[in-house]
Amino acid sequence: VSNLGVLEARGGDAAGQDERETGQRYRQSVGGGGGGGRVAIISDGTVVKGSVNVNGGKGMAEGLPGLPGSVYVGPKSQVAGNLTFNSGTLTFDTGGSWSHSSGAKGAGMVTHHSFEGNGGARYGYGICTFSFDSVNLGSSVAVLVRGRNALQLNVTGNVLIDTAISLNGSSGSQGAYSGRSGPGGWDSGRAADNVTSNEHPALEGQGPGGGRGFETGRSNGGGSYGGKGTGGLLGGTPGSTYGDEVITYLVGGSGAGHAEGGTGNSGGGGGAIGIRSDANITIQANGSISANGGHGLYVGDRSGAGGSGGAVRIEAANITNLGKISAKGGDALGGSSSGGAGGGGRVALLAPGAVVQGSIDQAGGETIRSTDLERPLDLLLWYKFDESIGTTATDSSGNGHDGSLVSGPTWTQGKIGGALSFDGTDDHVALGNPPALNVTGNETISMWLKPMSLNDRRNPYAKAYGGTGSFTLETNGTLRYFYGTSGQNAQPYASYTTGTPLGTNVWTNVVLVRDLDAMKVQYYVNGSLANTQNATYASATAGNLEAFIGKGYTSPFHGVIDEMTFTGSVRNDEWVKATYENQKADSTYLSFSNFQGPPAFIGSTDVYGKVGESMSPFNISVIGGGVLSYSAVGVPPGVYLNAA
């Protein structure tokens, strides 16, 4: 198949946004764009995908744009044999194909089923089955699972897994969009405006265990599956449990309920994966299989709720788990969170022979209000790169958008804790295409960069230079940022430069602020404003391209990257200065929990304890070195302060 033209299945624009329409007639709160469609190219031969556009339509006024659709490229024929990889990226698309970055590929078989949930309602689901003679996935191969169907691997020989396989659900975004489920699960509810009670089915978490959405005076309900979710701190209504202990039906977790627009982002359910072998299955020390529910996040004046855990079913003659298997419910996070947490999922290990159960976690989530876990409400992604081992870059924002290390970027000492070093040849981190990286309005991106060479144009981060944004390190040392309205790596786009060059072999803190309310783009370098330029477009256009750290449309990045964050708002001078001062060497700023900037401490703190237990209400540390002293006053005889 050779596409030398354009394949297009994009969503419709809201009133006043289509170039074919004259005038601008609309209601302020009714201007949503249509979702993108689907394009599939199926061939055992060579495929030239060419230009494909499945972007969502443009929103108007308070209406949001539609999300991108899907592009599927896969073979027709199933290929039997051994699945053995120890490097590169292996992708299972549960639409019906697998592929490896080496060029190897094969087809699967998708079947459709239904089962009866509680109350007699029937629910449909799909399973994508791949068959192999044996499976051996080493610790250096990155595994991506995508699509809407559950994943089933049928193997006649042995299965060895020494890498991470994730089918986790994710959190919603922008207080409106659903939290996506893992493959085989169900999404959370989505927002509806001007609601005073649960009067619209869009608010309900999807699936047989979906949590109840907005009710006046009540919190959003968490999703349920193997375990029941919670109603949160304000007595919401969680979903009902379903399924059985042996996971007869390979279905994933259910989503949490949502509230009105602009409020808490809720989590989707974990996905579903089955692995069956006629021989033995071993999950080695670096191996993990996860189908966790997405977290609920506090946004606006209301809490998001957590999705339920999904399903992991393993069948073999003998099973040995030396790694970790998890199907946890999603938490409800935020300092003021009251949303319901997701119920635990289901894990089944089925064997007539020996079973080494190992580490299994299918616990329900929690509603966590403690300040030591609070994150900025608009934090979309946060990569600390502090893992030091493994092939996963963990998203510490709580939104669950973990990245996969591809081609061997190495863990190294960073500006703060650990970092990732990229060789400039092929190392990168694959982030997929989550809604959190399809921000079309205001955005702040922060990172520490330590370039090792300037002999070529290189991308420290890239998604679409004609879409929601990419960075290019130029040969003169300046950093250039691009965004545009094509949604692709194509015109129209505009570029913005730091003006100030970055040095080689030294750390530089760079913050990019895209303020589209004020129509300006600002760069901060090492805490100080470096350049302000007029923004060209009032909105970026989301697209279907995947995002990467360390590579893009030019040469791969050569150097070290640390502490990369994406937030969906405009950060001001004070925030940028405080963050830089908080992280630089010899800092005189304090880090109190995750508070950004110099905090104001209260004079005293009530603590509670009992005999034999230490009282530790909080922990204080100085980032970048420094000395702290402690004292206690007013303590009774026999009680003392252990300053260590």
Image: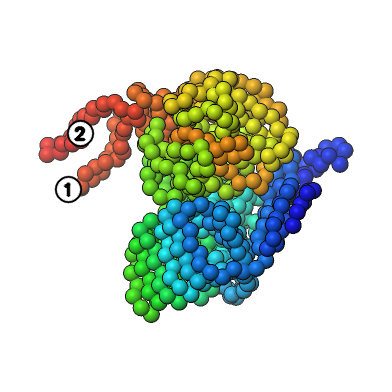
User: Which image quarter: residue 13?
Assistant: top right
Q: Decide: is 625 above or below 206.
A: above
Which color scheme did the rendering employ for the protein?
rainbow
Residue 153: image x %, image y %? 52, 69
Indicate which disc residue 643 carries. Answer: 2
Q: Amino acid at mark 1?
A: Val
Q: Which residue is mark 1?
A: 611
Q: Residue at x 54, y 19 (%)?
A: 500
Q: Decide: is 127 above or below 102.
A: below
Indicate which disc residue 190 carries. Answer: none
> Does the image show residue 510?
yes
Q: Is residue 27 left or right of residue 403?
A: right
> Does the image show residue 297?
no
Q: Residue at x 59, y 68 (%)?
A: 79
SS assignment at label 1: loop
Q: Is residue 478 left or right of residue 371?
A: right
